[in-house]
Image (cartoon, coloured by chain):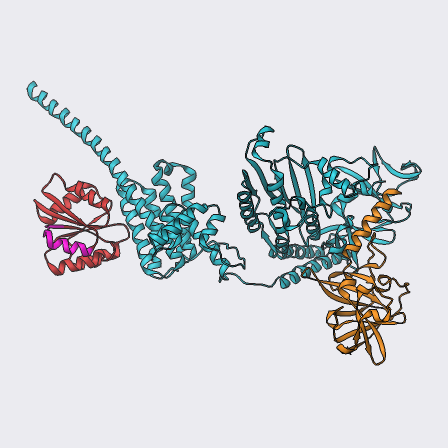
Amino acid sequence: MEKQDGKYLTFVLGNEGYGIPILQVKEIIGMMEITHIPKTPSFIKGVINLRGKIIPVMDLRLKLDMETQEYTERTCIIVVEIIVNQVKRFMGIIVDMVSEVVNIQQEEIEEALDYGAKVEGDFLTGMGKVKGKVFMLLNINKIVDFEEVVNLFNSELKEDIANV
Amino acid sequence: MLKVLVIDDSPFIFKAVKKALENSVFDVVDNAGNGKIGLEMYEKYAPDLITLDVTMPIMDGVETAKALVAKNPNVKIIMLSAMGDEALLSQAKEIGVSGFLRKPFKPEELLNKAKEILGV
Amino acid sequence: MSDEKDIDDIVKSFLEDDDKNRDQNENLVDEEFLNDFIQEATEHIENIEINALILEKEPGNEEVINSLFRSYHTVKGLAGFVDQDLIGKIAHQTETLLDGCRKKTIKANKNIVDIILTSSDYIKKICENISVAKDTNFLKEIESHLEVIFNAEKGIFNDITVELKPENPPKLGEILIEEKKINQEDVDKIIEKQKTEHPDLKFGQIAVKEKKVEAKDVIQATRIQQAKASISEDYMRISTDKVDSLVDMVGELVISQSLIEQFAISQLGTDNIFIANFNRMSRITKDLQNLAMFLRMVPLKSTFQKITRIARDTINELGKNIEFTTSGDETEIDRVITEKLLDPLVHLVKNAISHGIESAEDRIKAGKPPKGVIKVNAYNKRGSIYIEIIDDGGGINTERVYQKALEKGLIDTSKEYSDKEIQEFIMLPGFSTVEVANKISGRGVGMDVVKTEIQKIGGKVELNSIKGQGSSFVLKIPVNHAIMNGTVIDIEGSNYILPTINVKQILQPTSDQWIFMQGIRSMIKVREDIIPLVSIKKLFGKSREEEPVLIVIIELDQKYKALPVRNVVGRQEVVVKSVNEQFVNLGYVSGMSILGDGKVSLILDIENLFTSEGER
């Protein structure tokens, strides 16, 4: 697993703390109206208009197989930037609450396996410890690259419908 | 026979002059492609008359005329000009060119001019 | 007396005869003179062409300008002798222009070089065929050319467009090959000659001297080479981000304007001076929008040149007998898309060459000419760009495809598949022809990747193949960032957009209009027609079907479908943005747009509504 140190944006989902590298965070916006896209997996909420750019938004809870929760005024969309096939892409991920930017040293990042983490191995780059708190550091590239998932979902759906 | 030297870079003109002056008192002896060679040939043939083109490479008509006149103030030169050469012609006149003939010319025009200049 | 008269008569007739003879002789002389003239003029033309090449590279070269001046001057002078007034005219005008260059009152730029070559071309044409000087069309051409020269003397030029591409500048010979002006063999010969006989001359000069190409082709190639190597002073380099922003902003402008217009009309009615002025502004905005979109469009020419080169190489490598042609390379397409089109096109072309066209023996057996034909055509239609790759080869072997699909477990044995459906299997993932992994298709780029790549740019791939006759692949690519008039509809609480041109009618159905099949509303009767209903359940993967409140009759290619909606919200200009890559395979959406309220709305794909997916 990659180990990275540096600054992380931390946020909360339920009782757990998570972090993503600040370099991949484009901006943080409050919840806004999301246009739903039919025939997509439930963790994909739809798309939003970010100053003229249309970007997809996913619910991170659902993506990480957690129960969904009603959105409150603390709920935010973190817009992340990833590179897929040498192309820049933007994604929005919905989180319960955004915390703060923390500095995590290399030494304080441990392999996820040690903690028997709930989150699927692929999605974690490690576990970081800061001021006594533990944050699950997410591999945003893996989480946010959902193209194949959509396609698979779609073809399964087609079969279902055809069989109806 | 009166000797005529053609100084012109066009073989066509050479032929035309020859055609115009054949069967007469004139004998066209040679053709020089530019003024420099023309001067050399002038020395060689000592022609009685020269037809001179205005635009030639290396040394143009006006330059050549100047040089010829310098060699022999009495040299007889007919300058063959084309439309648009007017500015040069007045220059040439001052230098001492004997006559001008506009291209295209009829053979008899050249013949008559040549006779006129040489007084034959 | 009668004797004298007789003698007079005899002398007279003798003289007359003599005149006749002289005339005849003169005619002979004239012809001889004409030939001499043509010969000399042709020599001058050759010099003009070579000098023009030098002038192109060295616009300040006085020696060359003088030489060109003299050439035209001489030709002019001679033309009069043989009654070639047209040649004289052309030569005179060009000579005057060159005189201006000599005197430095006119700058010897590329326009001048073009004029020089055009003049020499015309003179050449007349020399080759004297009678062409009497052709009225030809004369008209010359007239306009003389106009051009006249304007040039005053400093007025028509613009020359030079293509700008930031690549490593290729050699002149390569460009000439690409432009189909010369073949590789001749290029090699010229290079040899350069090494052995004319080390002091440039490639272009030798090429013209050896009569392998025309001077004007070398000039054109030189310009292409220059454009690739540097930035022409007449052009500006602009980052594509800036252009994109401009295009986006103009798009937003059009939308805002549309909303204001709707509001204004609702308040003031259409017959109002405000509306009249507003319409004027609308027209300007529309022009602005066209210009903005235009900024990003480039012709397919260079893409086609690249695939032509690759096609030729592939054909040679495989030793196949195939004629490869392209058409429509002037068709313009968004700059970004041309880059993304290249790989899919190359793959399709290579496929056609290696798998599409059969061997010569097979072709002859099938009664086809031994030479295979592959064509790539591009054209505009109904707001999309179509690129076809057509071959007259053996077509797709549906049996083999079916077998392979069976092996891969993709077949539902209970189902009957049409030929077309079987053919389309080749575009499924994992179906690439890597079994025939030769150097050509060994890149592992299968048909499925082609389909995905095209979908990523918002396009579609359609395949048509007839066994024994050939195949055609048609790429349909939308013109990006188009602005279209959309009808906003409400389907189960969410807004979607339909292209207004496809909306035929909106009606509120009465219960007696429905036709049920197996207990489900399947069709609707509208006057005389029976129109099938679109299943929202199937379209959007919902679990149940809602009762339709309104019906929108949509039309495509004279076919109709009824789309059930909750409401028709309105009509407005929408900026079409392409679908995000992740959603490209969904099928029902052809684009996305931002409505006036700032919300994203999906644009429904009309074609998709007419396929079996939407059917009940």
Percent x, y for residue A79? Answer: 77, 67
The structure residue drawn at horizontal position 73% and vertical position 48%, both measured from the top left corner, is C429
The chain displayed red equals B
Name the side, left or right, on which C203 lies relative to C289: left
Q: Is residue C25 left or right of residue C484?
A: left
| Left or right side of C125 for A100 | right
Depth check, front residue: C171 or A48: C171
Q: Is C169 situated left or right of A3 in this image?
A: left
Residue B40 lies, in percent from the top left, at 14, 55
Chain assigned orange: A
The quadrant of the picture occupied by the N terminus of chain C is: top left
Task: Pick out the residue farthest to the top.
Answer: C2
Is residue A61 positioned above or below C68 on the image? below
Magenta-span inclusion, residue B109: no
The quarter holding residue A162 reads: top right
User: Would you say residue B43 sits in the magenta stretch?
Assistant: yes
Residue at 14% of width from left, 49% of height from top? B5
Chain C: give its colour.
cyan
Quadrant where the C terminus of chain C sits is top right
Q: Which residues are magenta?
A: B35-49
Q: Residue furthest bottom?
A: A131
Front residue of C548/C463: it is: C463
Q: Position of residue A122 (x, y in %)?
A: 79, 64
Q: Which residue is nearer to you in this view: C297 or A80?
A: A80
